Image (spheres, rainbow, N blue to C red):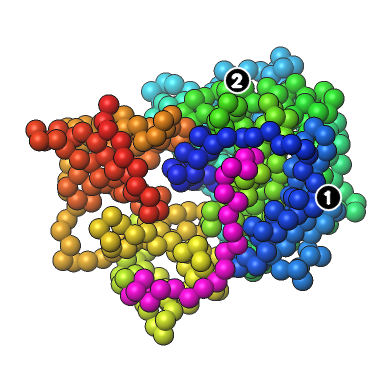
Amino acid sequence: MTIRLASLAVAVAATLSTLPMPARAMSDAQLAGMVRQRLHGDRTGACMAVAVVEAERVARAYQCARDADASRIGADTAFEIGSVSKTMTAALLAQLVAQGKGSLDDTLASWLPAGTQMPDYQGQPILLRHVVTHTSGLPALPSRLGAKSMDDPYANLDEAALLASLGDAKLGAAPGTQFEYSNFASMLLSYAVARRAGTDFESLARRELFTPLGMDRAYINERPAGVRAAVGHTPNGKPASAWNFSTDLAGVGGVRATLDDMVRYVQGGLGQVDAPIRTALEATHAAVSEQPPMGMNWMRVPVKDRTVLMHEGGTGGFSAFVSLDPKQQRGVVILSDTAWHSIGSLGSLGMHLVDDSLPLGKPRKAVAADPALLQALAGEYQLQGAMKMTLRERDGRLFVQAEGQGEYEMGHDDAGDFYPLALDAVLRPQRKADGSYGFTWTQLGAVFPAVRVDPDAPPAPRLSPADLAAYAGDYPLMPGFSLAVREQDGVLQAQATGQGAFPLAATAADTFEAPAYGIEIRFQRDGAGKVQSLELHQGGRVMRGARQ
């Protein structure tokens, strides 16, 4: 249910790509062939239900990485759609606004019980528009989550604990000024919408959204007869626990739906279904914020001469992708019974179906790692904000051991990732500009940059706010795509066009890293010592920009 900064290269491709008008509507066989090309033989063992919705027809495909698993999914199978649920919550909010029951400029507090302790920033309150654009300033998760296991992290959270968590929260910036994806804020919105409507969230969704659109098998906690709940899986193929939500908090990520349910939802979003909710669905598409470009819980992605609305979702065992292209009257739905978010999400298939000039991608296959890479990675590391970790090379394989824990053998795939064979995590090597390696460790939706523990390494530069301000400027990397660098509160931050800001850490003279995203930035100076340009290194690609 989280969003991480996308690869800058992918963002550029989406911005500059061309979306040709198809000569004819896609057939089921064409779609099945495309999904099979992307999925068959993938080391995750995932199954996917996919649809391309066009004005003329709907193409559907049900495909699995292994043919023997075909029975895992079908037309009667309901998937957890994760954060795609947020777009539905936004539609219910938009309908209440259209009915005169509120405004996006209302404070969040005014939609919550009287007396609820609310954080603000120097007297500036959180508004509903900040919640639907993830600029509320609230943290990702409530402080009183009460999770007994991260296998089902929200199961023990109720409304009282959610509201009490507001009293623990502190805002570090004015609402509306910084993007920080917050499931905490979205759960509050789910609760607030149900409260303002005077009913529970599932009844509200069924009455106003599911039934009018013909989403007859969609549900939250009350599964309709004849619906089969899919079993989720981790990216290493192990069964995952279902995620459960208190009903009124489920608008954050608790909707379950079949492929046909989501087809009807997309058709509603494209205005192809005549239902009372149609106007509210359309209202969620309009721009509410520019950095990043968002409607109401929809990402607004520029694709040549049009704007495509997108949202991805994920739970412990599921991933989902939905897009709407109102101008082309085309939509895409991908539902997977496997969690893909730690290994790159559903983006390659989803973006290819949105725009066939973007690469489809290929299955991840288990392969042996280069012995030189294993030797380069071996050593002691400190995970940022977490424990120490040791990597060892033995008999041509990589083993990982966190401090105080057992040792795990790692598999390796042809995408370049290592993964524990016994648990759900990903170790992603990152080759630095100087040829050395580091890595990020991804687990439970969090990304931990790893710093090699080397007592002989020189200390990182300590720079004053004035030193950091010398790097500030706008650095165009490609037409229509720029990196803005700013000093804020003693930290150097960068923000790419259409994305959220991220911090940079100094590692050497004129060199900074954002290790969670595999980014290294090297600034160049002119003869007078003034910063004049930068090089951005990410994933083996280098982009250069002159300072403006």
Image spot of residue 282 (x, y percent)? 70, 24
* Residue type indicated by callout 1: Arg
User: Mark 1 Cα within 10 Å, few/some/many (few <14, many 20+)?
Assistant: some
Q: Amino acid at mark 2?
A: Leu
**Residue 62: which quarter of the image?**
bottom right
Span colored in magenta: 354-375
Residue 419 position within the rendered picture, expressed as x and y whole percent measured from the top left: 50, 68
Q: Secondary structure at mark 2?
A: loop
Q: Is residue 99 above or below residue 393?
A: above
Frontmost residue, 539 versus 336: 539
Q: Which numbered tag is attached to residue 74?
A: none
Image location (x, y in percent) of residue 126: 51, 26
Q: Are marks 2 and 1 in contact (CB under 8 Å)?
A: no
Name the main secondary structure of what is drawn in magenta. loop
Label of residue 223 in the image: 1
Q: Residue 536: horizontal and vertical position, in percent?
A: 32, 44
Q: Quadrant of the C terminus?
A: top left
Single out the residue that lies furthest toward the right: 225
In the foreground, 467 or 359 = 359
Residue at (32, 63) in percent of width and height: 437
81 relative to 108 in the view: left or right = right
Dot 2 corresponds to which residue? 104
Q: Nearer the viewer, residue 84 or 355?
A: 355
Within the image, what quadrant is residue 330 found in? top right
Q: Left or right of 464: which side holds 307? A: right
Q: Residue furthest top?
A: 100
Residue 290 located left or right of residue 327:
left
- Residue at 27% across, 33% down: 546
| Residue 319 vertical position relative to residue 387 in the rendered view, above or below | above
Q: Residue at x 71, y 51 (%)?
A: 335
